[in-house]
Amino acid sequence: MRCINKVRALQPRIVAGLLSFIVSLSFCGCARDPFSVQYGSLKIGAYDTDGSLAEKAPSFASSLCIVTEDVLGDGQINLNDCESAVLFDINNREVVYSKNAHEKLYPASLTKIMTALVAIKHGSMDQVLTATDAVNIKETGAQLAGIVSGDSMTLYQALRLLLMYSANDVALLIAENIGGSVDGFVAMMNEEATALGATNTHFTNPHGLSNEEHYTTAYDLYLIFNECIKYEEFTEIIQLQSFDATYTDRKGKEVMLSVKNTNGYINGSYNPPTNVTVIGGKTGTTAAAGNCLIILSKDINGMPFISVVLKAEGTEALYSDMNKLLDSIDNSMAVDPE
């Protein structure tokens, strides 16, 4: 009751202050025209508190694809083996396909595109990273480069092991050295997600091993990946088929490590449809997340597309569904020979 009474006592002064401020604006004017926002439920980032798409300022939305409902490509794209998928025409800001774009799901190692983005923005390629005991991951089946406490490598090397080979221990190496601690780096990841409008995303680690509070959506991954590909360091890495790293162990000896890209389109395990070129992307797989893939591709005219498939039921289903998405690019953009 005391708090309520204090607020009531302050109300006349608050109202008077607001009236004074409004009157002063009417005489002084503004340096630029304001934009209007309709009020209803509280708007946080890209979405209302009720989960619907919020109105955004043109500066945020004007260069992005916006999804408010499923877009099934006139029924021609039939994806039954995955939980969520999207395909966006980047230049034309067109939603070609969207299935459960805003459903919160585990991203597995697609998490690492955000890890790479934060590292690129806040680190330097020649920065030397030194491992601590934090890199000691015990989870069965986790993809590891095999680094141990005291080992060191450059961020240039670490990013390639992170994005190409999906090394979880390297994700922790990057996090500790760029963020000061793993928790500090994860906070940076979440801040970056919010800044990009990825408001249905929450990270708890830099690698993507399953955690109930670690989730994102196909649409949010598009927002993050769309930012990643603005950086040459990122797009250069996701195109590489293989990489040979020479790093230093805790005794000062050189260690050789050769890795191949886990992306089936890049390592030659799978072929995209005719007239579509896959530039690169990121894979992710855990028992909870299923099989996941995000791809940057180009049509016959060199126009870029971003596609995401989440929680597919196995590797074959993953690439089958991704090819169905990419095939819709092929069909819509293919030109008849003269």
Image (tube, rainbow, N blue to C red):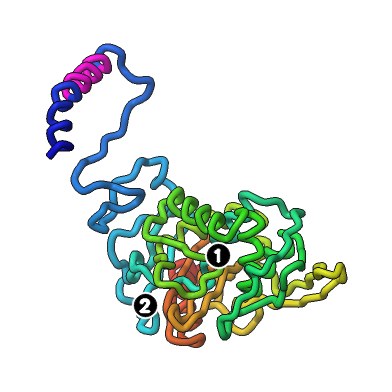
Start and end of the magenta stretch? 15-25
User: Is 183 one of the magenta-colored residues?
Assistant: no
Separation of disc 2 and disc 1 at Cα?
A: 23 Å
| Residue 73 falls in image quadrant | bottom left
**Relative to 200, is 336 above or below?**
below
Please give the name of the residue rendered at 39% of the width and 47% of the height, measured from the top-left corner: 61
Does residue 297 appear in this view? no
| Residue 2 falls in image quadrant | top left
Q: Amino acid at mark 1?
A: Pro
Please give the name of the residue rendered at 29% of the width and 46% of the height, measured from the top-left corner: 55
**In this rendering, which labeled residue sits more in front, label 2 or label 1?**
1
Secondary structure type for disc 2: loop
**Relative to 7, is 306 above or below?**
below
Please give the name of the residue rendered at 26% of the width and 56% of the height, measured from the top-left corner: 52
Give percent across and percent down for residue 13: 18, 21
Identify which residue, 160 or 322, lies in the foreground: 160
Please give the name of the residue rendered at 33% of the width and 59% of the height, measured from the top-left corner: 67
Asked if residue 68 lies left or right of residue 4, the reply is right
**Relative to 284, is 221 above or below?**
above
- Give the main secondary structure of the magenta stretch: helix
Give percent across and percent down for residue 333: 47, 66
Give percent across and percent down for residue 172: 62, 66
Q: Which residue is mark 1?
A: 206
Q: Which residue is mark 2?
A: 83
Of callouts 2 and 1, which one flags the residue occurring earlier in the amino acid sequence?
A: 2
Q: Residue furthest front?
A: 2
